[in-house]
């Protein structure tokens, strides 16, 4: 799934080493998260690897509302 978004295999391995929980996430959740973080917020791959906990947070309940409050 990550490779569809332009991630190299080494990037995926670094993410899994940093946060093995990412393997337990559904494909739909990974896709939504990657679309939001990369396209909406403009985060690059090294930033997402170093902040791998972002994938565990709920987009609807935590990430999107807090991002909206920063944009005001």
Image (tube, rainbow, N blue to C red):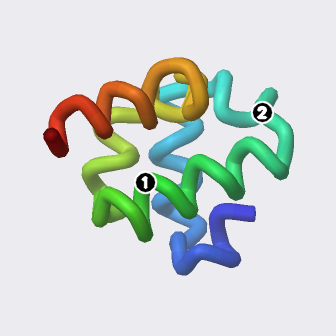
> What element does badge 2 sit on?
loop
Q: Relative to 47, is 57 above or below? A: above
With 36 as the anchor, is 28 left or right in this view?
right
Residue 50 in the image: x percent, y percent? 30, 38
Residue 62 in the image: x percent, y percent? 47, 21
Q: What residue is at 43 percent from the left and 54 percent from the top? A: 37
Image marks 2 and 1: residues in contact by CB distance under 8 Å: no
> What element does badge 1 sit on?
helix
> Which image quadrant is residue 18 in?
top left
Q: What residue is at 75 percent from the left and 63 percent from the top? A: 1
CA gap, disc 2 and disc 1:
16 Å
With 8 as the anchor, is 28 left or right in this view?
right
User: Badge 2 local density, few (<14 within 10 Å), some, or many (20+)?
Assistant: few
Q: Which residue is mark 2?
A: 25
> Which image quadrant is residue 16 in?
top right
Dot label at residue 23:
none
Q: What residue is at 66 percent from the left and 52 percent from the top? A: 32
Q: Which residue is mark 1?
A: 37
User: Badge 1 local density, few (<14 within 10 Å), some, or many (20+)?
Assistant: some
Total marks shown come to 2
Of badges 2 and 1, the one in the foreground is: 1
Residue 36 in the image: x percent, y percent? 50, 56
Residue 72 in the image: x percent, y percent? 15, 40
Q: Relative to 58, is 41 above or below? A: below
């Amino acid at each position: 799934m990550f490779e569809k978004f332009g991630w190299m295999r080494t990037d995926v391995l670094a993410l899994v080493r940093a946060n093995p929980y990412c393997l337990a996430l559904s494909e739909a959740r990974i896709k939504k998260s990657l679309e939001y973080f990369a396209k909406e917020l403009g985060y690059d791959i090294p930033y997402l690897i170093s902040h791998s906990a972002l994938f565990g947070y709920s987009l609807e309940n935590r990430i999107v509302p807090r991002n909206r409050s920063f944009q005001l």
